[in-house]
Image (cartoon, rainbow, N blue to C red):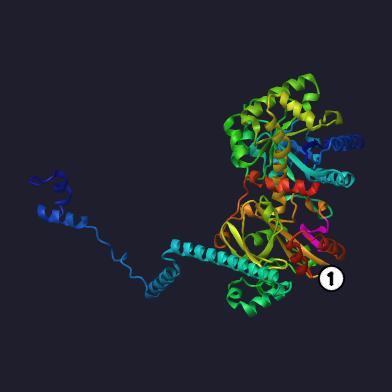
C-alpha cells in the first residue's frame, strides 16, 4: 500500500477547482498510489466564529459581514457531498479518506472543534459523516504546547506550513518525542519544493528542523504530497530521491513512505470503527467492507452473508477447518 | 512555683480564692484530655451487626492464599491441556496402527470415536469432549442467547436501531467462555484460520477446543498477542441467507483476565504494535 495522506481540498468549490483536484487524483492513480486522503483545512476564523458571538467582535474588525455569513456546518456538508462524488468516481482504483486539518493559533479559543469533528457532521438527510483522519496545524508555539498537553488521543497527525518559516517558534526534542510516544505522526509535505525557489528554500530549512527534532523520524515522520497541482506529485522513487537529498538513509525513508502513513491511517480508522482499539466491527478496519466479498454495511455494523454459490466455492477450496465450522453454524 | 505570678494573682486569685494550690489543681484538671459525653456514642446494635456480617462475608470471599490458588489453577489447566493432547496423540496413533495392520478399515470421525468407546474406554475417557457436543450445549444453548440478549441483536432490522459504539463497549466487557472464535489475522501464520470454542479465557491466551476434520478434536492454546480474533454472530433472516454480524477482537489490547476486564477503562494507545494488521491486509489484498 502506498499512501498519500494530504491532497488539499479547494477552499472555494467550483467546477475548475474540482477539476484540478480530479486531475491530481488521476495522476496519483497513475503513480500507483492506493490510499489517498482528501484534506479539508479549517482556519481559526472558520471555527471560532461558530462558538461565541462575543469573540467575533474582538477578532474580526475587517470583514465582519463576510464572517457572519459563513457557516461551518454547511461548508463541511458541501465538502462531504463532493467527497462522496469523488469516492463514487475513483472508488474502484483508489481508497479515499476524509481528513480534516485544524489550524490552531490560540488554544483557549478552540472550544469544542475536536469533539465536533470526531462526533461527525450531520447533514440535512440525517446522515452523519465522520472524518477518518484529524490533524493539527499549529500557527504559534501555544498551539503546539496545547497538542502535547491536552489532546486525548483524538489527533492523528501533526503538520506544519512548510512554505513559510515557522513564525516565532522553535521545535524541541522533548515536545516532538512526547508526541511520538502518544502515537501522533508528524507530517512532511513535499509540494513546496516544486512550487518556487523561495518556497523550496524554506521547505528545506523547515523539514531539516523537523527531521532533526524527531531524531531522524524513524518512528514518527510520514511523507505526503499536499499538491494542489498535478505537477507537484511524485512517485515512490521520486520521493525517495528527495528524502535522500535531505540526508536521510534508505531504511528511514522507506519507513516514512510505507509504515508510518499506514499506522496513522490505522489509528484514525480504529477511532471510528472500534471501541478504544479493543473490539472492532468488520474484519478490515482500514479498507472497510468494500474490499471484501459478501460483506456489506448496515448502520456501521459489518454483515457477512453467505449465499449458496459462494458457499459451494468455499467448500471446494478446503483451505482450513475453521471455514467449515463457520458454514455449519450458519446453516 | 514559689512566687505567685502576677497574672494569676491579678486575674485568677481575685475571684474570692486566695490559695494558689487550689488554682493549680483547677488548671490541671482542665488540662486532662477526656472525651465529652456527646462523643461517647455507642454504636447502634443493628448497625454494628450489619458491619460485622459484612466484614465476615468479605472475609469468607477473600482468598487467603491467592497466589497459590492462582498457581494451582494454572497447573490444573496446564495438566488438562497436556493430558488431552497426549490422549489425542495416543488415540490417533492407535487408530493409525490398527488401520495399517488391517484390523479395521478406514473410519470416519464418528466411527473412530465409537470404536475407541467400545474397545479402549480408558483412552476415550481422557479425550477432550467432542466439538459438536460442546458447540450444541455451550455455544448454541448458552453463549449465543447470552450475547444476543446483551447486544440486543436478533436480525438485520434490529441492527438499524442499535448504536455501534454501545455494542462494541458491551462486547469489550462481555464473557467469552463458550464463544466460537476464529483467528482471522495473526503474526504467527501457523495459527491462522484456526477456530474453536473458548473453554477458558486466560490473561494472555485463549484455551480453545478446536475441531479437526477426520480426526479427534484438540485443545489448543492460542496467545492473544499479535492476533485478531473474529466473532460472527448469526442473525435471523426470513429468506434463509445466512447473515452474520462480524466483530473482531484485537488481542494485543485484550490482555486482561475476564474479571479485571469488566470494570476496566480501556484507553487508546500508540498503534505501532499493530503493524501486523496492515501488512496482513496488504498481502491479502495482493493475493
- How packed mark 1 is, by other alpha carbons closer than 10 Å (few <14, some 14-19, many 20 or more), is few
> Chain ID for label 1?
B
Tell whether B265 sits left or right of A321. Answer: left
Tell whether A62 sits left or right of A179. Answer: right
Tell whether A225 sits left or right of B79. Answer: right
Residue A293, located in which quarter of the rendered image?
Answer: bottom right
Point out the image quarter for the N terminus of chain A.
Answer: top right
Seen as rendered, the residue at the extreme bottom is: B118
Picture layout, residue A280 above or below residue A144: below
Q: Tell me the residue at 59%/58% (across/down).
A: B205
Along the viewing direction, whichever of A132 and A47 lies nearer the viewer: A132
Along the viewing direction, whichever of B123 and A311 lies nearer the viewer: B123
The residue under label 1 is B240
The x, y position of residue A125, in whole percent, is 84, 54
* Residue B178 is at least partly visible in this image: no
The x, y position of residue A249, in whole percent, is 68, 28
* Residue A4 is at least partly visible in this image: yes
Amino acid at each position: 500500500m502506498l499512501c498519500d495522506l494530504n491532497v488539499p481540498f479547494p477552499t472555494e468549490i467550483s467546477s475548475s477547482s474540482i477539476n484540478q483536484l480530479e486531475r491530481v487524483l488521476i495522476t496519483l492513480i497513475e503513480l500507483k498510489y492506493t490510499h489517498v486522503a482528501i484534506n479539508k483545512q479549517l482556519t481559526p476564523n472558520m471555527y471560532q466564529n461558530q462558538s461565541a458571538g462575543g469573540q467575533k467582535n474582538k477578532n474580526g474588525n475587517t470583514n465582519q459581514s463576510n464572517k457572519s455569513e459563513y457557516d461551518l456546518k454547511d461548508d463541511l456538508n458541501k465538502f462531504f457531498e463532493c467527497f462522496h462524488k469523488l469516492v463514487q468516481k475513483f472508488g474502484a482504483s483508489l481508497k479515499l479518506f476524509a481528513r480534516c486539518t485544524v489550524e490552531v493559533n490560540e488554544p483557549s479559543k478552540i472550544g469544542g472543534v475536536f469533539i465536533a469533528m470526531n462526533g461527525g457532521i450531520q447533514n440535512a438527510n440525517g446522515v452523519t459523516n465522520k472524518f477518518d483522519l484529524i490533524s493539527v496545524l499549529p500557527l504559534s508555539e501555544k498551539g503546539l504546547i496545547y497538542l502535547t498537553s491536552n489532546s486525548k488521543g483524538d489527533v492523528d497527525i501533526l503538520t506544519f506550513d512548510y512554505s513559510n518559516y515557522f513564525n516565532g517558534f522553535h521545535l524541541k526534542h522533548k515536545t516532538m518525542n512526547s508526541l511520538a510516544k502518544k502515537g501522533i505522526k508528524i507530517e512532511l509535505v513535499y509540494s513546496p519544493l516544486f512550487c518556487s525557489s523561495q518556497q523550496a528554500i524554506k521547505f528545506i530549512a523547515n523539514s531539516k528542523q523537523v527531521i532533526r527534532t524527531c531524531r531522524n523520524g524513524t518512528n514518527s515522520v510520514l511523507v505526503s504530497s499536499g499538491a494542489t497541482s498535478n505537477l507537484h506529485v511524485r512517485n515512490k522513487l521520486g520521493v525517495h530521491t528527495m528524502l535522500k537529498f535531505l540526508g536521510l538513509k534508505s531504511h528511514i525513508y522507506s519507513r516514512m513512505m510505507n509504515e508510518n502513513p499506514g499506522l496513522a491511517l490505522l489509528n484514525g480508522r480504529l477511532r471510528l470503527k472500534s471501541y478504544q482499539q479493543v473490539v472492532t466491527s468488520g474484519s478490515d478496519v482500514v479498507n472497510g467492507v468494500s474490499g471484501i466479498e459478501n460483506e456489506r454495511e448496515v448502520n456501521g455494523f459489518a454483515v457477512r452473508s453467505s449465499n449458496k454459490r459462494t458457499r459451494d466455492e468455499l467448500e471446494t477450496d478446503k483451505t482450513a477447518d475453521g471455514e467449515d465450522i463457520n458454514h455449519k453454524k450458519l446453516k | 512555683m514559689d512566687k505567685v505570678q502576677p497574672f494569676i494573682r491579678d486575674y485568677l486569685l481575685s475571684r474570692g480564692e486566695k490559695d494558689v494550690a487550689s488554682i493549680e489543681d483547677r488548671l490541671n484538671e482542665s488540662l486532662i484530655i477526656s472525651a465529652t459525653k456527646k462523643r461517647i456514642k455507642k454504636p447502634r446494635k443493628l448497625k454494628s451487626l450489619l458491619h460485622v456480617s459484612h466484614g465476615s462475608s468479605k472475609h469468607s470471599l477473600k482468598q487467603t492464599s491467592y497466589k497459590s490458588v492462582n498457581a494451582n489453577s494454572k497447573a490444573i489447566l496446564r495438566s488438562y491441556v497436556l493430558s488431552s493432547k497426549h490422549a489425542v496423540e495416543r488415540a490417533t496413533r492407535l487408530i493409525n496402527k490398527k488401520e495399517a495392520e488391517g484390523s479395521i478399515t478406514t473410519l470416519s470421525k464418528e466411527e473412530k470415536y465409537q470404536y475407541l468407546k467400545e474397545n479402549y474406554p480408558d483412552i476415550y475417557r481422557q479425550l477432550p469432549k467432542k466439538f459438536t457436543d460442546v458447540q450444541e450445549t455451550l455455544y448454541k444453548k448458552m453463549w449465543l442467547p447470552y450475547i444476543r440478549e446483551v447486544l440486543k441483536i436478533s436480525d438485520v432490522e434490529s441492527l438499524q436501531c442499535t448504536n455501534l459504539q454501545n455494542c462494541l463497549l458491551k462486547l469489550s466487557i462481555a464473557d467469552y467462555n463458550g464463544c466460537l472464535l476464529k483467528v482471522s489475522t495473526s503474526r504467527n501464520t501457523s495459527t491462522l484460520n484456526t477456530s474453536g470454542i473458548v473453554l477458558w479465557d486466560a490473561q494472555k491466551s485463549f484455551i480453545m477446543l478446536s475441531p479437526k476434520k477426520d480426526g479427534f478434536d484438540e485443545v489448543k492454546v492460542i496467545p492473544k498477542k499479535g492476533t485478531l480474533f473474529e466473532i460472527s454472530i448469526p442473525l435471523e433472516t426470513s429468506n434463509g441467507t445466512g447473515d452474520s454480524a462480524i466483530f473482531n477482537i484485537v488481542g494485543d489490547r485484550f490482555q486482561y483476565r475476564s474479571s479485571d476486564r469488566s470494570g476496566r477503562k480501556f484507553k487508546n494507545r500508540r498503534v505501532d504494535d499493530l503493524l501486523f494488521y496492515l501488512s496482513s491486509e496488504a498481502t491479502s489484498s495482493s493475493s
